[in-house]
Amino acid sequence: MNAQQIIYEQSAIDEEVKRIADRLGFEAVYDGVISPEHYVLRPIKVSWILREPHDSGGDYDYKEDIIDKLSKNKIGRSKYFDPMRYLEYSLDNNLTFYEDIPNSDEDVNISNMLLNTAFTNISKIVGGARVRDWGIFWQNVEIFSSVVKRQIEIANPTIIVASGTIDFFRHYGFLENSTAYPKSYRNYYAVGKRIILDCYHLSYPFSQEELCDDIILALKDAKDRGLLN
């Protein structure tokens, strides 16, 4: 898809998310490809798949919010967003490791790399730092599952970072006919020309270096195996 097609499709998805959330009596948070104009230019496209919005209230658009804050230099260091932009930098620099990546608050070019990625919550209803009720969470995941699957189809990523969400991919058949390869934390999966990484949740009490280098090491291994060009 080109940028305009992604914008059109995401607008339709946002409308569907609102309809579902209104029916449930909740406020939704909207996500997806942050900046389609930047995303479509990436030779290797990355989509982060997360659990639920980490906030106390909804009815806002992550995509618009991120673009606005970046334009005002208001997104500095962030345990949630730094791994996303550091991975983009690493992909542009021969899969360099975390220690050689400039800090996001010291280099505006690193900060703005957040525009190159996509991220999607498998539940669009706000939660908190931790899932409080797994039963309700998975009910919401099921309700939004067709939307999320469509978001992945639209983004068509080369790399999916399943951040504490690998069970979603198992349950909905994304790992069928996949080949698993070990990495420092669990596995990564090759499915056709796509890599799906089973990774730490972004709120997990590990350092950003451990999180990022776990991903980068797996991608180096995939590249050595001819799974990533």
Image (cartoon, helix red, strand yellow):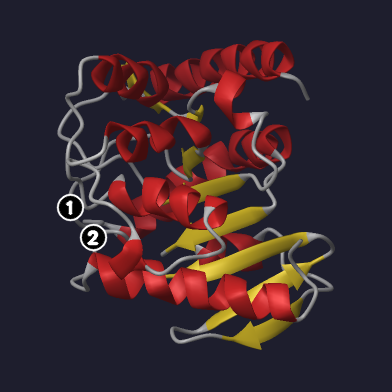
Residue that badge 1 annotates: 129
Image quarter of the C terminus? bottom right
In which quadrant of the rendered view does residue 173 lie?
bottom right
Amino acid type at circle 2 is Ser
Quarter occupied by residue 206: bottom left
Calculate the distance from the C-alpha at mark 2 to the C-alpha at mark 1. 7 Å
Asked if residue 40 shows in the view, the reply is: yes
Left of 212 or right of it: where is 170?
A: right
Near-viewer residue (124 or 223): 223
Residue 37: x and y in percent read 60, 19
At label 1, the amino acid type is: Ala
Q: Secondary structure at mark 1?
A: loop
Closer to the chain start, of discs 2 and 1, is 1
Residue 201 seen in the figure: no
Q: Is 137 positioned to the left or the right of 46 in the image?
A: left
Is residue 222 placed above or below 21 in the rendered structure? below
Is 77 situated left or right of 172 in this image?
Answer: left
Question: Measured from the top left, where is residue 228 in percent x and y?
Answer: 73, 65
Instruction: Count neighbours of disc 1 (C-alpha within 10 A) and say few if under 14, some if 14 to 19, many if 20 or more.
Output: few
Q: Eyeballing the image, is 161 above or below 144?
A: below
Q: Which residue is located at x 78 percent, y 74 percent? A: 178
Q: Residue at x 72, y 41 (%)?
A: 156
The residue that mark 2 highlights is: 203
Q: Horizontal and vertical percent for residue 214? A: 43, 76
Is the C-beta separation of discs 2 and 1 under 8 Å? yes
Residue shown at 35%/34% (left/top)?
A: 109
* Residue 59: mark in rendering: none
